[in-house]
Amino acid sequence: MGRKGFSLIEMMFVFVLAGVIMAIGFPRLRNSLEKQNVRSSKALLATLAATARGTAVQRGSSATLYMTVDSIWETACGVNPPAVSVQIGTKKLVGDEFGVTLAPSAASVVYDPRGIATVFASTSIRITSAHYTDSVVINPVGKVIQQ
């Protein structure tokens, strides 16, 4: 037999084997990516909360962390007169970036010039993807305690 190449049986065996490997691997990969997206959005939320606290202390004025179903942003009193509320950084679209939805227990957390939350109640934010859910809690003082 001097022919070159693969027979149809050999090709079908390779395709079936590749299909089985993909059927096992893709769901695990998808779940891992979803978990990582939820973790990344938790880290982003904690970072923005710390930034809002730091901005309030640094500027000596109140700063606010806003949360909606798909985005997070922060505002603070401007440094140049007139002292109006300005956005700090950019609005983070976590829904588009990470494919998650947020369910905050309060729409915003306001920090006073000392970096302490003005409403002495815990704020919990549930972060949900298609198959994975986690949460972040901001304590009554305004610090992220569960991450």
Image (tube, rainbow, N blue to C red):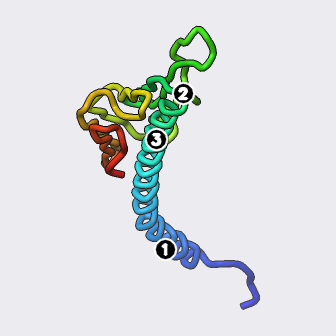
Q: Quadrant of the N terminus?
A: bottom right
Residue 99 higher or lower than 108, as above or below: below
- Residue at position x 23%, y 34% in the image: 121
Secondary structure of the residue carrying tag 2 is helix
- Residue at position x 47%, y 70% in the image: 21
Secondary structure of the residue carrying tag 1 is helix
Report the Cα–Cα distance between label 2 and label 3.
14 Å
Amino acid type shown at disc 3: Ala
Secondary structure of the residue carrying tag 3 is helix
Report the Cα–Cα distance between label 3 and label 1.
50 Å
Amino acid type shown at disc 1: Leu
Residue 29, percent across and down? Answer: 46, 60
Q: Nearer the viewer, residue 18 or 60?
A: 60
Q: For the residue carrying disc 2, how many other residues have a C-alpha within 10 Å: few (<14), some (14-19), or many (20+)?
A: some
Q: Quadrant of residue 116?
A: top left
- Image marks 2 and 3: residues in contact by CB distance under 8 Å: no
Residue 8, percent across and down? Answer: 58, 74
Q: Which numbered mark, 2 or 3, is in the foreground of this view?
A: 2
Q: Quadrant of residue 128?
A: top left
- Residue at position x 53%, y 72% in the image: 12
Q: Which residue is mark 2?
A: 59
Q: For the residue carrying disc 1, how many other residues have a C-alpha within 10 Å: few (<14), some (14-19), or many (20+)?
A: few
Q: For the residue carrying disc 3, how many other residues have a C-alpha within 10 Å: few (<14), some (14-19), or many (20+)?
A: some
Q: Which residue is mark 3?
A: 50
Residue 119 higher or lower than 144, as above or below: above
Report the Cα–Cα distance between label 2 and label 1.
62 Å
In this picture, residue 56 sits left or right of residue 145: right
Of the numbered discs 3 and 1, the one sitting upstream in the chain is 1
Amino acid type shown at disc 2: Arg
Q: Which numbered mark, 2 or 1, is in the foreground of this view?
A: 2
Of the numbered discs 2 and 3, the one sitting upstream in the chain is 3
Q: Which residue is mark 1?
A: 17
